Amino acid sequence: MIEIKILTDFTFAPGARDYDDGKDSGQEFYETLLKSKFDEALKQNVQLKIDLDGVEGYPSSFLSESFGLLGNEYGAEEVWKRLIIVSNEVALYIKKIKKYIHEKR
Amino acid sequence: MKKGRAILISIVCFIGGVLLSYIASQYVYFKMKTEISVFDMSISVLGLAIGLYIAVTLERQKNRGQNFYSYVESKFDLLWQDFIKLSDVLDYSPNMELTEISKSLKGIYKKLTPLKTIFVASDYDEKCIIAIEEKISDFDEYITGLESNNNVINIDTFRDKITSKCNEINECFASSYKSLNHIS
């Protein structure tokens, strides 16, 4: 299993949608970490576990951009079945991520 | 000890009630029958037992409702207070860091989710809490989706819309509070 723990692997304070909005954006997360880890998981045919806990909070724009791009690139169903999302602090983030992955862009 | 005493008092009251009810049923033209009618006595005991059962059941139901109301009300208050804090800060700030907004919203979600679970798991109407969740989620999407510069949102530019959305949520809280009062 491939793992991403956002708190230690990316940031303590996720930013907004894209590079124009500032650092640690959803686009930055997708391009520097999420995409490469997802490719690795596909290559090894294993699950990608993403741990959301521990950070300050997730702006919807961050989740929408990063997971929306992932769903758009690899197909919503393929992405959704390969992910294991850990969000013990706020379960609602999982619901939001599912929505953004399945949203057509 | 207290429970034993309560049972003793209940038994004494019950026997007193049975005797009173029996004597009243035997009271005819200022004459008291000296013999005991087993039938009348049984009716008295049965009548009082049924009355006692109804009273105890109603009391228990009322207590259950009140306990649930007190528990939910305290959680609901904390949730609303958190949202009021956020909307007050948004009301006065010219600019705000995105991190601060998402941190506050995370705190709100942390309180909201268990409250929603309590409502759904119980027999009470969960529409109000679901409406609040939807409104806050929409607000989150709106405010964190606003254009930012170095992760700072210029609140003044979007003030009218932000205030209107905050007011909508506060109205939703207020109407939910009214429906919550039906529980008590």
Image (cartoon, rainbow, N blue to C red):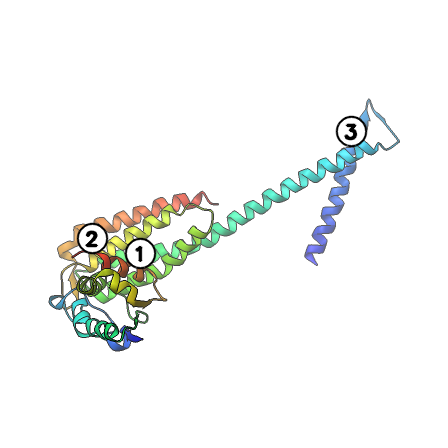
Labels 1 & 3 near each other (Cβ < 8 A): no
Task: Return the mark for residue B25.
Answer: 3
Q: Measure the alpha-carbon separation of dots 1 and 2.
A: 13 Å
Q: Residue furthest top?
A: B29
Disc 2 target residue: B162
Q: Are the residues under marks 1 and 2 on the same chain? A: yes
Residue B35 image offset from top left, x and y in percent: 88, 31
- A22 left or right of A38 in image: left
Q: Residue at x 23, y 60 (%)?
A: A76
Secondary structure under the numbered disc 1 in the rendered image:
helix
Residue B144 appears left or right of B83: left
Mark found first going from the N terminus, 1 or 3: 3
SS at circle 3: helix
What residue is drawn where x is 34% and y is 62%? A91
- Letter of the chain that mark 3 sits on in the rendering: B
Task: Say whether residue B94 is left or right of residue A94.
Answer: left
The image shows a total of numbered marks equal to 3
Q: The disc labelled 3 sits on which kind of residue?
A: Ser
Q: Are marks 1 and 2 in contact (CB under 8 Å)?
A: no
Counting residues from the N terminus, which is met first, the one under dot 1 or under dot 2?
1
Badges 1 and 3, same chain: yes
Residue B11, relative to residue A3: is it above or below? above
Quadrant assignment, res B92: bottom left
Q: Quickly name the residue at label 1.
A: B83
Residue B156 place in picture, x, y as percent = 15, 57
Label 1 to label 3: alpha-carbon separation:
63 Å
